Amino acid sequence: MLKKFIRSLLCLLVAVYCIGSVAYAAPDDITGHWSEPYFRSLSAHGVINPNGKGHFTPATAISRAEFMRYINRAFGFTEEADISKYKDVPKNQWYYQSVRIAVKYGYISGLSATQMAPEKEITREQAITILGRLCKINAGTVKPSQLKFSDRAKIATWSAPYIKWGLDNGYIAGYTNNTFQPQRSVTRGEAAKILYFFTGTILNQDGASYNSTSLNRDTKNVTVSTPSSLMGMTVSGNLYLSEGLKQAAVTLDHVTVKGRLVIAGGNVQLNHVQANDLYISSPFTGREIKVTSAGMTSIAQVTTATTAQLIQTNLQAGAEGFQKISVTGDKNTPVTLNGRFADVTLTGKNRMIAAPDAYVQSLTVKGASAIEGSGTIQNAVFAASGSVSAIEPATYSFHKGVSATIKGAKVSTNRTQPNHTLSPSTIQMNAAGDVVFAITSDDKSAVRSVMLADRMLENGTQYVYDGVTGSIRLLAPAFQGLPNGTHTLQVIMSTGVNPTAVIHFSGGTQVPTPENNIPQTNTPQNNIIQDDLRQNLQFSAVAGHVANRDVMISLNIDQSVVVQAVLLENKQLAMPAQYTIMGNQIILKRDALLDLTQGKRGGVTVTMMLSNGKTLSAPISLI
């Protein structure tokens, strides 16, 4: 009995001792230390954790493998690469997976082709170089001799540009004795501080919505590694959407980025986003990053270095979207464009795909690029030979000695805006009768229709087009009901460049009689636009206005009749860039209307030319 009591007492004493050990455990080793706030923040996000004793050991130098582990956690990196070539990374070591992940994301390389040196202490110049690679900076050509430190001769050539970048952004600093000490080992406390300011606010809660209250007060950058939404915030530094997103969705809504917007992963929706510099780059070949701009988004410069799709849709009036795009990736990393784009530059041996609805106003080709797809390119400048384009730009030019293959044919001669003229350009007619006009053209194009004094003429009864000789013969019925005076003959060409001639006619009557007139377009027999729609065609260039949208016009016409051309203020529109036809609806593109109505007030007139020789006209009120 006594033995049993003693055993129980001993067990109780052991339990009390253990409880006391937990309750009175030694305090951590960072309270009051200069590195405390950095460790507290990074530990809360699972980046740097204390050891089994609850210590962070801020003064201890860290290894290359430890720095990799911190990076992987901070940016949500999880995918792994084959590292069998590195003979000093055993599979049974704790850092084996960390090294595999680091190599997969491409931010670190070995000290040689077969040596990673994971247990070797990481140096200051190695650490800042890794961060520069993560930020996708253009390292430039900074030389060690250009740095201000007295020990600059010890700085490696490969690290000098990154050191300059790190100094400029405050991620690293020199010492008070004017040295940088590039080979000095980085302590855990130093690593915590560097990562704290480099990552800035870490947003890594899956599916969360963040706003301005989510941001740190003492850092500038923001790092996103999980699918989420950012709304109503200004990022004073860089916004980094990490590779860890893979292809998950991220939405930026009313976000302004003062530094660089880096998109390394994800399917990203930009609504009302303002930034000067967008850089798109991923270490994964073939994994497409999708970025869509909408609303009042304006990005001054976009650089794509890897596979990406850029979409512009539902931009509001005044928004500039992706203003200038520079493609730097190779032919294994295509960039697909979908929407309207003002300025695109292919910097080298790039690959660009224009979606069917894509419209590129200006394309500059500086290398042997591949241009694919079926979109529209208005003008192209070829500055280097070897390009192959499946799309024929409306106009193009070549630098001296340069050629390109366009739609299967080798071309080296500039193509300017097609020029069409009518001859004679002026004619005097004293009576109705046949008259022939020759069409002089420097481009292969077809005649779509003919107008005389704003009236569409009927093919076969009022005019005849001879495609062999390239001539238009006006027949006597074309002049029936035409009043005396000066009238314009206009030939509508498939290129949109419509030649004109002037006819001075004195063989008619002062006031034409209705029975001699060609039927007017406001009678039911001519298949007018529905009256209720004619009175409600409105367009506004004001962002957010209810009328700031595509203009849809419903036609009440026979199914056998087709729309051959659409004119706005007598200027022929291009399809599909400026309008599309869906069933019995004409859809005038909002982006095109913004350009075509700029500076105009009151209203404009849209005219549809039909295959039966008739025209339909309707006013659009500009409000």
Image (tube, rainbow, N blue to C red):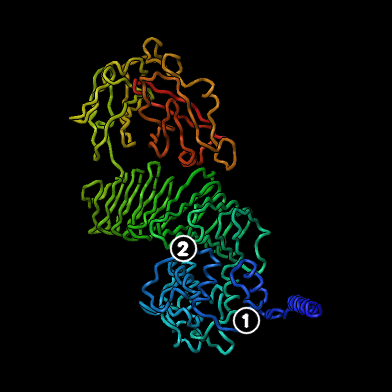
- The residue that disc 2 covers is 79
- The quarter of the rendered structure image containing the N terminus is bottom right
- Amino acid type at mark 2: Glu
Find the residue positioned furthest to the left.
468
Q: Residue at x 36, y 24 (%)?
A: 562
> In the figure, 39 relative to 298: above or below?
below
- Identify the mark at residue 489; answer none if there is no mark: none
Residue behind mark 1 = 57
Give residue 577's quadrant in the image: top left
Q: Assign the C terminus to one quadrant of the image.
A: top right
Task: Give the image quarter of residue 289.
Answer: bottom left
* Left or right: 58 as drawn, with respect to 107: right
Q: Is residue 196 left or right of residue 522?
A: right
Q: Observer-nearest residue: 155 or 192?
A: 192
- Give the percent coordinates (x, y) of residue 511: 41, 14
Mark 1: give few (<14), some (14-19) or many (20+) Cα within 10 Å: some
Within-10-Å neighbours for mark 2: few <14, some 14–19, many 20+: some
Looking at this view, name the residue that lies furthest to the front: 1
Please tell me which residue is depicted at 78% across the width and 80% down the height of the picture: 3
Element under disc 1? loop
Q: Is residue 129 left or right of residue 481?
A: right
